[in-house]
Amino acid sequence: MSRITEEQKMLVESVRRMAEEKIAPLAAEIDRKGEFNWEVASLFWDLGLLQIMLPEEYGGWPINPCHTLCLSVEEIAKVCASSALNLIIQAVGSFPLIRAGSKEQRDRYLPMISKDRLLMGYLVTEPGAGSDVAAVSTKAQRANGRYVITGRKTFATNGGVAGLYSILARTGAGELSFFILERETAGVVIGKFEDKCGFRGSNTAEVILEEVEVPEENLLGRPGDGFKIAMADFDMSRPTVAALALGLARGALAFATDYATKRFTFGQPLIQHQAIQFILADSLTLIEAGSGLMEKAALNFDEGRQNTSLASMAKYFCSDAAMKITEDMVQVLGGYGYIKDYPVERMFRDAKLTQIFEGSNQIQRMIIGREIMKKASAGP
């Protein structure tokens, strides 16, 4: 049984109206232009959606913020996944500061997010370090009360539009640490913007760090805490990716169902054909099953319970489901599903990324397998 509160219902209804009235008419253009849309970001700020995961005293959602974020992401992804991703990266980029930041760091930087409306970037992935976070090679060398950071980050969501970055760097042998970094710091260079298959309205850039000097007080937590923080961040972010995938699947299914009621073949509506009914039935079943996994993973995180396996299950199950469902909805539309005049083509392209980022689905299965072995080794 779903545990959505009355306050969440009110927020979700507001998000749904905004998505349908304000974002849906822009979705095709956002995809076509492949540019970050500041108008949409402003709508999110106005509703408080980019602050959901912040502590309540800094403008965040007071109860079950991860679950609330998932519900909001899902509603927006029904019409525009590129826009929905902005909510996720804001939460992901803020997480190291929220989890490990001192009171002084929070007091300085969190108002920049909640009041000054700065977007967050998350600088972890590198040319040789994707799902293998431990392979990060960017260096942060300590000297004269400062750290000098040198390296190159790739596939940085919001990389070219963020005002603040959380950056993971190597501070010693076998030691990774997070830093908070302001965009205007000398030595921060925005490299190429990626021309992507899907999520084209999400800004994805290379960020080059050329001997960037940051004061010691920009270190989040203690030296060496970085890997632990990154893993905890995944426990929060993977349920939100599951919600993103569910939104894509629900949006594609709704459009195809409506199309199938209006399209006639062999003298009757397409939806009257059993072959089509089976496709729609399988899709809805996958969505409802995934929704339960997503909600349980998010609520476990909110309640401080271990959710690593559940987060991985939700992420891979929902993204695999989204890939299958969007492909099937293209098939339901036939030739029309393959052209850009219809949104299922865009949703199909967008769904693919959900199987890759925040840890590929093969990595998710490895994580679940390791958790199974841990429990088996621990005994009854």
Image: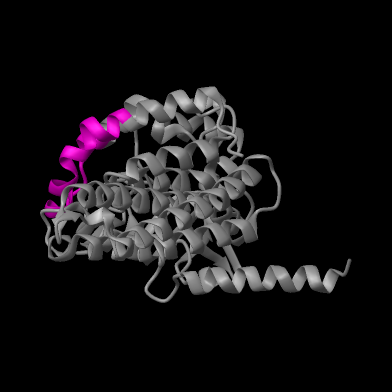
Dividing the picture into quarters, in which one does residue 1 lie?
top right
In the rendered structure, does residue 28 fall within the stretch colored magenta?
yes
Expressed as whole percent of the image width and height from the top left, the position of residue 376 reads 80, 72
- Depth order, front residue of 346/267: 267
Tell me if residue 32 comes above or below residue 19 in the rendering: below
Magenta region, residue range: 17-40
Dividing the picture into quarters, in which one does residue 11 lie?
top left
In the rendered structure, does residue 323 fall within the stretch colored magenta?
no
- Report if residue 30 is visible in the image: yes
Give the main secondary structure, helix, strand or loop, of the magenta stretch. helix
| Residue under the point 34% across and 58% down | 277
Q: Is residue 166 left or right of residue 298?
A: left
Q: Is residue 310 left or right of residue 33?
A: right
Expressed as whole percent of the image width and height from the top left, the position of residue 191 reads 24, 62
What's the coloring here?
one colour
Dividing the picture into quarters, in which one does residue 195 lie?
bottom left
Point out the image quarter for the C terminus.
bottom right
| Residue under the point 69% across and 43% down | 304
| Residue under the point 21% across and 32% down | 22
Expressed as whole percent of the image width and height from the top left, the position of residue 203 reads 26, 53
- Depth order, front residue of 128/218: 128
Expressed as whole percent of the image width and height from the top left, the position of residue 184 reads 30, 45
